[in-house]
Image (cartoon, rainbow, N blue to C red):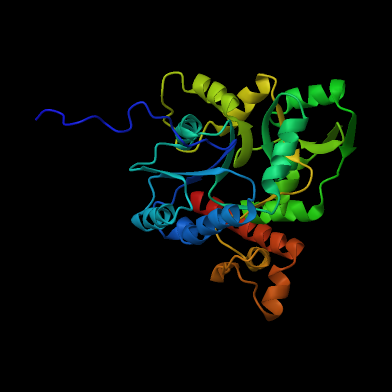
Amino acid sequence: MPRIGINPSRNQNVSYSPPRVTVAVLVYAPHQAGYFQHRMDVTRLTLESILTNTEEPYELLVFDNGSCPEMVAYLQGLFAQGKIDRLVLSAQNIGKLNALYRIAQLASGSVIAYSDDDVYHLKGWLPAHLEVLDTFPNVGAVTGFYIRQRVVMSSDSTLAWAKSSADAVERGLLMPRKWEEEYMDNSGRTEERYQSEVAGVEDVVVSYHGLKAWVSAHHFEMLAPKKVLLEVLGEMLVEGWSDQLMGRMVEMDDRMDAKGYLRLTTYAQTMRLLGNALDEEVAALAARDGIHAEAAASAKPRSGLLRRITGNRKIRNGIQGLINWLYGLLHQSGRE
């Protein structure tokens, strides 16, 4: 059948003008059991924190990496409500690095604020990230939660710049203890493991043009120029594909560092790791922001003597150490 008439869109201009920032979240929940039992609640709080605590103009892009039907239906509901601007649904998990590259290609903004689906965005997070990006030179990545051991990972260029060009440099054990405890709790680390990772590591804070920032960045959440991500990821995926589901993110950090880009963290904490289950502290934080969230039953504090015992980190780690020792003893006996 011949074409009838002329397409009315011909010779018309696009009316959409993208904002500077694309906020992108990568979602993955293959089912709702085991490790992923509470993933729906965690992902929901991640997205609600962005929607509630981001006042500046932005585009919200969500990439679902092969999740279960329940998660897909939830995301489609947000898209139908206009809360998600761009929703990408992948039938299979294509791997984190591949998905991040697709996000960088699809983002309309010149700056990408990327996040995993288990990060709470605090009030003021976006202007704080942008201030670091716009103040410091040649920035490759800005994150909002400082992690001490990252100072000795993918930070050589930043440390070299700090030595030669920063207005001031502070060194020492400067990180608040509360941040350390939050990181241990939400990353599943024991005190022993954490202390072994940070042994001999000093925090480094740099000042430049009146603004302070921590040296180092990570990749579970980061704000980066789109061109930097496309440059680094394009080189990593020059053959078009990575066959690893979770790997090569540290390689991305290293490549960014090797190219001379600065990797920094906002001086004030602007993000909070959620882990794979919400606790009462996070639920209370969300409530203060007007967001309803319930702590998982497994994450709620216990009462009485058990609560006092498990609430003491030294006792808890001692018990864990005893369990590990007994397991090793039994395992060794079984081998003999």
Residue at left offset 70%, top offset 63%: 316
Relative to 277, 27 lies left or right: left
Residue at left offset 51%, top offset 55%: 43
Q: Is residue 258 above or below residue 134?
A: above
Relative to 183, 42 lies left or right: left
Relative to 124, 81 lies left or right: left
Instruction: Report the quarter where the N terminus lies.
Output: top left
Q: Nearer the viewer, residue 327 or 71?
A: 71
Q: Is residue 242 above or below residue 42?
A: above
Where is residue 262, by image quadrant? top right
Place of residue 185 in the rendered image (x, y in percent of width and height, measured from the top left): 66, 56
Count of marks, rendered view: 0
Is residue 190 in view from this perspective? no
Where is residue 232, by image quadrant? top right
Q: Nearer the viewer, residue 330 or 272?
A: 272
Residue at left offset 37%, top offset 58%: 70
Q: Is residue 92 above or below residue 179?
A: above
> Residue pushed farthest bottom?
304
Place of residue 245 in the rendered image (x, y in percent of width and height, measured from the top left): 45, 37
Place of residue 313 in the rendered image (x, y in percent of width and height, measured from the top left): 74, 62
Relative to 66, 205 lies left or right: right
Is residue 265 in view from this perspective? yes
Place of residue 32 in the rendered image (x, y in percent of width and height, measured from the top left): 41, 59
Where is residue 231, by image quadrant? top right
